[in-house]
Amino acid sequence: MPVHLQSLNDLYVRELIRLEEEIKEYIHDADVWKILPGTSNSGGNLCLHLCGNLRYFFGAVLGGDGYVRDRDAEFGIKDLSREDLLKIINETRSSVQNTIKNLSEDIMAKEYPLVILGKPHITEFFLMHLLSHLSYHLGQLNYHRRMVS
């Protein structure tokens, strides 16, 4: 695997492990779903959104694994256990890693198959964008967890 793809893989794995650790650190399952004053998303919904986002843009679009995204459910579900969320994170990590290992320099340099953010982007740019999206929401989830625990 080319060095930059290995680096990308390592960064995604690192952030998904952090997501897993955050979910594990909630004291009670119900805490994951609390909405804090001035916010609109629970930690659980942020987790589901991150996993749905990655499973779709990596697994379905690039990997062709058949994943079907339900973005409304990512924000509508309110009662999964932490164990259920951890299974979803693990499935997401597998999807991301399986997709990255099958990427090539040619794919990374080509236009991503979907127009995102209002204009076409090369795949490498979009995957870096997804990593920053993951990190951004992971910070929100960390804040949420510390406030409800």
Image: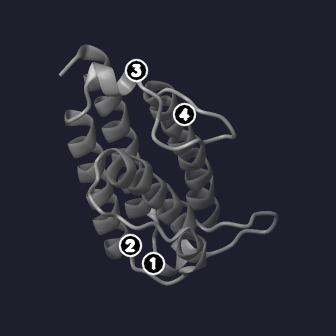
Q: Earlier in the sequence, mark 2 or mark 1?
A: 1
Where, by quadrant of the figure, is residue 101 drawn? top left
Q: Earlier in the sequence, mark 3 or mark 4?
A: 3
Q: Secondary structure at mark 3?
A: helix
Where is residue 56 shown, x and y percent of the image? 42, 56
Q: Is residue 17 left or right of residue 110?
A: left
Residue 31 or 140: which is nearer the viewer?
Answer: 140
Which one is in front in this view, the residue at disc 1 or the one at disc 3? 3
The amino acid beneath tag 2 is Arg
Q: Secondary structure at mark 1?
A: helix
Q: Is 11 drawn above or below residue 43 in the view shown? A: above
Label drawn at residue 137: none
Which one is in front in this view, the residue at disc 3 or the one at disc 4? 3
The amino acid beneath tag 4 is His
Residue under label 4: 129
Residue under label 1: 29
Q: Earlier in the sequence, mark 4 or mark 1?
A: 1
Considering the image in quadrants, where does the N terminus appear? top left
Q: Are the residues at dot 2 and dot 1 in contact (C-beta closer than 8 Å)?
A: yes
Q: Badge 1: few (under 14), some or many (20 or more) residues near its Cα, within 10 Å? A: some
Which one is in front in this view, the residue at disc 2 or the one at disc 4? 4
Residue under label 3: 109
Q: Earlier in the sequence, mark 2 or mark 4?
A: 2
3D distance between C-alphas at marks 4 and 1? 30 Å
The amino acid beneath tag 3 is Ala
Residue under label 2: 82
Q: Are the residues at dot 4 and dot 1 in contact (C-beta closer than 8 Å)?
A: no
